[in-house]
Amino acid sequence: MARMISREGRSLLVQQGMPRRPLGDLYHSWLAAPWRRILAAVLLLYLGLNALFACAYLLSGGIENAREGFFSDAFFFSVQTLATIGYGRMSPVSLGAQVLVTIESFCGLTGLALVSGLVFAKFARPTARVLWSEVAVVAKQDGVTSLMFRVANTRGNQVVEARLRVGMLRFETTAEGERVRRMHDLPLVRAESMVFALSWMAIHPIVPGSKLYGETPESLRASNAEIFCSLTGLDETFSQTIHSRHSYSVDEILWGKRFVDIMVTLPDGRAAIDYTRFHETKPAPLG
């Protein structure tokens, strides 16, 4: 069965039967959309609005120094009016044109205020730059078989009061014979960090009581298990909460492997982290 959560932690489930409301949550859609889509939407709206008013000016007439029937003159007069530029060469002289100019200038002022506010909200929205290891590993750690993965803060600042939670999603069969999807917490050796500035090795001991105890790659694959990770913390620069999510499928969990050491010493004696080896693993005993 296909995975239900993407590697970035987003749901891959297809919603069926839910009413579609394309205009019901525009603000959320704006904040979640990529910048290229935002810029394309603003540009299309700007050109479309000017084209609409240009057609209205052509129908109403009354634009001094504009050539009759020339769409380009009407379009560029609309651009000047919408942006309240007003070079003075072309101007409205009829009542209909004056009304259109009034409406368009109002649309321009309102639209500029709205777009400015939305762009600022998107700029001000804090985002996390967190690097997750491409795979998780299962190997001995301090004498205990453990599930491990790496996470690092790739931004130069610090994330204070960082908290990491790990869970496992899998299918199970109830006593009534019903197949259900359940989430189980996987406690970590260290689930909180006062200052998350460099890298963090998340370790879940696979001991009696753990939902991974006694599991094998085959049994996890049969239950379509996925490991879901969530990191939250307070960004010191914005003083706002940031979050990052990730998931590992069964095929992205390597058994009998451990991560290589990424701490190195520079020639001048300073300690450094070699992120080029962040995802590298090496063989390790399981038991």
Image (cartoon, rainbow, N blue to C red):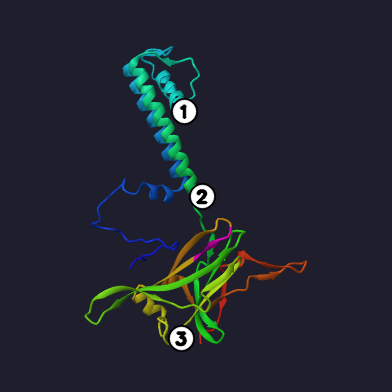
Residue 130 place in picture, x, y as percent: 53, 62
Q: Main secondary structure of the magenta part?
A: strand
Q: Indicate left or right for 214 with 22 as reference.
A: right
> Cβ–Cβ below 8 Å for labels 3 and 1?
no
Disc 1 secondary structure class = loop
Amino acid carrying mark 3 in the image: Val
Question: Label 2, on which residue?
Answer: 124
Quarter residue 43 falls in: top left
Q: Nearer the viewer, residue 55 or 282?
A: 55
Disc 2 secondary structure class = helix
Relative to 157, residue 53 above or below: above
Mark 2 and mark 1: Cα distance apart in space: 25 Å
The numbered mark at residue 33 is none
Question: Label 3, on which residue?
Answer: 207
Q: Residue at x 34, y 76 (%)?
A: 222
Q: Looking at the image, which residue sits at the far left?
A: 176
Q: Indicate left or right for 166 with 69 as reference.
A: right
Question: Label 1, on which residue?
Answer: 83
**Range of residues picked out in magenta:** 232-236
The mark nearer the N terminus, 3 or 1, is: 1
Disc 3 secondary structure class = loop
Q: Residue at x 41, y 76 (%)?
A: 185
Relative to 88, residue 157 above or below: below
Amino acid carrying mark 1 in the image: Ala
